[in-house]
């Protein structure tokens, strides 16, 4: 199996999911778009993951590679119809690329918070055997406000009505993060845009509390990420 991973900043990689990729001997290629790496020929890949990043979907003047990325996502999902998984920015890009809409979320949703599966989410194969209510790391200032055609909302939170969605039968995305590792919060807090959002939303001294909350949930984060990974990989083989 060949997996294409589109990244937008070095510290937002597949994280915990890398452990499962290694265990399964999955051949995966990361493309660091923000460093000018080109998107390779899509035909040779079986699945695509699109990770998070500090830029917004509309920042095409500052990050012109977003245009090519959205074009690749459209081709992947609508024409090639191959399995797609998007996380955070990857969730927003899926919506934007396929005709949905994203807008600023005020205030941003930051912290280890509850997400709840919808009835459709409970029935969806991507969440098979997963709890209907989960704790998840949130760190976003944008939300999907209009979904693409043929979209089903799979999870929600009080602050954000679209926490997870499926488009068609082959594309899934989550606004929250399933890839959290022990050093994730520390690493992300070093990114100026993320640190600024954290301080402006939760206060100057918010980082230790967020780190403590994330550390206390690492076991459940890992359990849920492995289930999500297994369920996604089952979709690739169909």
Image: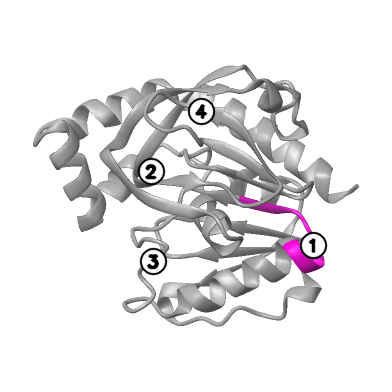
Which residue is under mark 4?
Answer: 156
Q: Could you tell me residue 221's position as x and y percent?
A: 52, 28
Local crowd size for mark 2, using a 10 Å CA cut-off: few (<14), some (14–19), many (≥20): some
Assess whether mark 1 and mark 3 are in contact (beta carbons under 8 angstroms). no
Assess whether mark 1 and mark 2 are in contact (beta carbons under 8 angstroms). no
Q: Residue at x 91, y 47 (%)?
A: 238
Local crowd size for mark 1, using a 10 Å CA cut-off: few (<14), some (14–19), many (≥20): some
Q: Is residue 190 visible?
A: yes
Q: CA distance from mark 2 to mark 1?
A: 27 Å
Q: Secondary structure at mark 3?
A: loop
Which residue is under mark 3?
Answer: 58
Which residue is under mark 1?
Answer: 46
Q: Could you tell me residue 49's position as x and y percent?
A: 62, 56
Q: Could you tell me residue 163's position as x and y percent?
A: 51, 35
Magenta residues span 78-85
* Towards the viewer: 57 or 208: 57
Mark 1 / mark 4, whichever is N-terminal: 1
Would residue 133 appear left or right of 22 to someone viewing this image? left
Q: CA distance from mark 3 to mark 1?
A: 28 Å
Picture quadrant of residue 233? top right
């Amino acid at each position: 199996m060949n997996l294409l991973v589109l990244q937008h900043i070095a510290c937002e990689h597949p994280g915990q999911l890398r452990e499962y990729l290694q265990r399964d001997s999955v051949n995966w290629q990361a493309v660091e778009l923000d460093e000018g790496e080109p998107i390779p020929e899509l035909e040779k890949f079986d699945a695509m993951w699109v990770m998070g990043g500090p830029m917004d979907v509309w920042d095409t003047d500052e990050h012109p590679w977003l245009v090519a990325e959205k074009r690749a996502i459209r081709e992947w999902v609508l024409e090639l119809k191959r399995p797609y998984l998007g996380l955070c920015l990857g969730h927003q890009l899926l919506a934007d690329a396929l005709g949905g809409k994203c807008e600023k979320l005020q205030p941003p949703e930051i912290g280890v918070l509850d997400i709840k599966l919808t009835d459709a989410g409970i029935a969806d194969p991507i969440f098979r055997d997963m709890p209907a209510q989960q704790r998840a790391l949130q760190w976003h200032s944008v939300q999907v406000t209009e979904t693409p055609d043929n979209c089903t909302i799979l999870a929600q939170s009080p602050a954000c009505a679209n926490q997870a969605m499926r488009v068609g039968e082959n594309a899934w995305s989550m606004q929250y993060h399933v890839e959290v590792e022990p050093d994730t919060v520390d690493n992300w807090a070093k990114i100026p845009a993320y640190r600024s959002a954290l301080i402006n939303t939760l206060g100057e001294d918010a980082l230790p509390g967020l780190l403590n909350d994330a550390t206390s949930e690492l076991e459940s984060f890992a359990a849920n990420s492995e289930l999500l990974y297994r369920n996604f990989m089952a979709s690739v083989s169909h």
